[in-house]
Image (cartoon, rainbow, N blue to C red):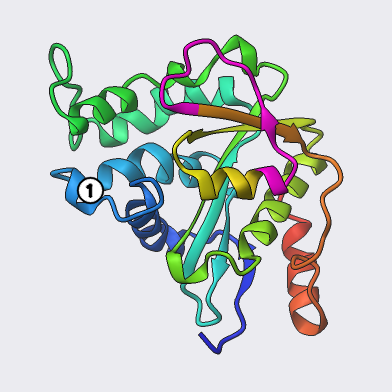
């Protein structure tokens, strides 16, 4: 923990770490390994497709040794992403996670059904917030300001693309996450019958560069990376 951690753009070599972070935080912020026969289901839903389809919008928290210990990723356009998820991503994972027949009987089957229904992401109430995101950090790296740095990198990249607003969905029961998003200026988006979820949104404008601009050599490295973020 005495290394200097920093936010940087995602690299293909981070893929396994990305999947691991997702699995270890997918149970309402805790480890979801025990919930699914194949724990990789969570990553196939909520992490890897974003890094595969829109890597320019993926950022990781590097612990200083090159290892990713947190990430933020998402899409600039949810409608286009859902289409690419079906046509590009699903064929890559269908053999590993075939669609259940009939009504889901287990949590794993429910989540696998979601995997095969990417159009679930498209809701008319979210049209004014076309981008969406997922952010996760391993527990030892939470509540240390790194979540804000990751979010700043992602929102800044969206803003440079001309995307005006972003949304996310979260389990309503995850009160620490809600407090974090509230501090960052996210506000509730009313969606009929959201189930266990709450939808939040905010503008991509007004992002402070603190933690992303850095200083010295890291500042130059980050500036070069920012120029290719999109």
The residue lying toward the viewer, choosing from 123 and 13, is 123
User: Residue most toward the right?
Assistant: 206
The residue lying at 18 percent from left, 43 percent from top is 36
- Whether 45 is drawn above or below 78: the answer is below
The residue lying at 47 percent from left, 27 percent from top is 197
For the record, the magenta segment spans 182-197
Residue 115, x across and y down, in percent: 32, 28
- Density class for disc 1 (Cα within 10 Å; few <14, some 14-19, many ≥20) is many
Count all numbered tags in the image, as a single digit. 1
Left or right, 9 with reference to 101: right
Left or right, 59 with reference to 105: right
Dominant secondary structure (helix, strand or loop) of the stretch shown in magenta: loop
Can I make out residue 230 in this image?
A: no
Can I make out residue 40 in this image?
A: yes
Left or right, 209 with reference to 180: right
Task: Choose top left, top right, bottom left or bottom right for residue 88.
Answer: top left
């Amino acid at each position: 923990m005495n290394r200097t951690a920093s936010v940087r753009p995602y690299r293909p070599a981070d893929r396994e770490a990305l999947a691991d972070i997702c699995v270890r935080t997918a149970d309402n912020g805790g480890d979801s390994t025990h919930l699914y026969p194949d724990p990789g289901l969570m990553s196939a839903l909520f992490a890897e497709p974003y890094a595969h389809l829109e890597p320019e919008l993926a950022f990781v928290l590097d612990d200083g040794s090159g290892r990713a210990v947190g990430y933020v990723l998402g899409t600039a356009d949810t409608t286009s992403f859902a289409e690419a998820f079906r046509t590009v991503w699903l064929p890559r994972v269908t053999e590993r996670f075939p669609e259940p027949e009939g009504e889901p009987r287990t949590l794993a089957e429910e989540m696998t059904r979601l995997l095969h229904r990417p159009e679930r992401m498209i809701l008319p109430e979210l049209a004014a917030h076309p981008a969406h995101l997922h952010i996760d950090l391993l527990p030892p790296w939470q509540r240390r300001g790194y979540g804000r740095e990751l979010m700043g990198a992602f929102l800044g990249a969206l803003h440079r693309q001309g995307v005006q607003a972003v949304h996310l969905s979260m389990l309503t029961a995850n009160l620490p996450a809600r407090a974090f998003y509230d501090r960052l200026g996210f506000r509730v988006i009313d969606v009929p019958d959201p189930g266990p979820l709450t939808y939040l949104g905010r503008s991509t404008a007004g992002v402070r560069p603190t933690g992303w601009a850095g200083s010295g050599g890291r500042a130059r490295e980050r500036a070069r990376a920012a120029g290719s973020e999109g």
